[in-house]
Amino acid sequence: MPSNKQRREAAQRRLQRQLERRAELARKRRRNLLIGVTAAAVVLVVATVLLITGIGGDDADPAAAEPTPAPTAPATPGVVDGSDGTCDWTPADTTANPNLQADTGTPPVEVAPAGTTEVDITTNVGPIGLTLDNANAPCAVASMVYLAGQGYFDDTACHRETDSEGLAVLQCGDPSGTGAGGPAYEFPTQVTGDETYPRGTVAMANSGQGFDGSQFFLVHGDSQLPPSYTVLGTIDEAGLATLAAIAANGNDGSNGPGDGAPTQEVRIQSLTVAA
């Protein structure tokens, strides 16, 4: 039978082994965390440089001869404004940015965070029908409906088209046509971090600072973007056919290969909410 001394020594050895295992697990966790953070940083930098540049609203200028510098960080996932039936419309700095329209006012604070809203876009190339998701993007939908009621989008040009691998979109919603325009207010980007942007998606453009305005982009080919853009809804088959015709005409490459203003002007003649 082991003596008390032997039992104590055995217990000490077991404790030492446990401490060593715990220390090794801690080292592995720190190493894995470092690897994960480094990988995420690399992915973010690559995605930012190759994809985000120009998918901006309000203070970005994707139509410029040189691409707009990428934002330092994407919109913060988890911001879901409007889910309680109200939205926070923040005044935009129309003095600092003359491309913003100071006379738009703001939408109603109360919104409908359920159901869908049908929108008809008539362009000089063809029709584009949208089904907007009130539950997923209540404030973005409320904003588009409000601006449409003012005729805000009517007779405006879509200022950007891309057809590069991993990014195929038509960007619209800026009456100034500069890529820097928007209304007199902004509101939080509504993302969860799980967003994807396959063909047929309509999403809100933003400046990379966690706020949306009036600019939106229509995805005509599966696009690899970080989950930093509010998914507004989907595009109907007629709209996808119109977008295919626009994409076939190409762009002027003013932002780089495969990225610029549409070669053939794409003009929204009217954007209306279906009755």
Image (tube, rainbow, N blue to C red):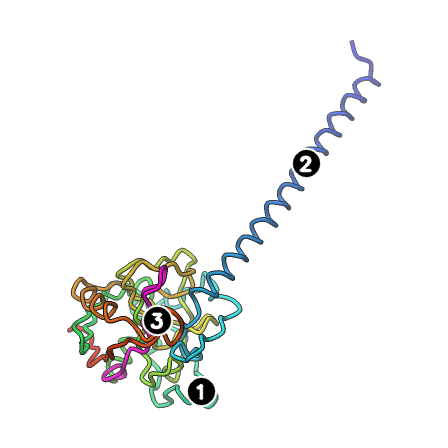
Residue 233, compared with residue 175, is above or below; it is above
Tell which residue pokes out farthest to the right in this image.
Answer: 5
Labelled disc at residue 97: 1
Q: CA distance from mark 1 to mark 2?
A: 56 Å
Query: Which three-letter amino acid code belongs to the residue tagged 3?
Result: Cys
Q: Which residues are magenta?
A: 151-168
Residue 152, compared with residue 226, is above or below; it is below
For disc 3, the marked residue is 139
Give the camera-side residue of 257 and 132: 257
* Mark 1 vs mark 2: in front: 1
Q: Is residue 162 magenta?
A: yes
Q: Kindly report the secondary structure that dominates the magenta region of the rendered protein.
A: loop
Question: Mark 1 near mark 2, Cβ–Cβ under 8 Å?
Answer: no
> Circle 1 — which element?
loop
Q: Is residue 201 visible?
A: yes
Query: Which three-letter amino acid code belongs to the residue tagged 2?
Result: Arg
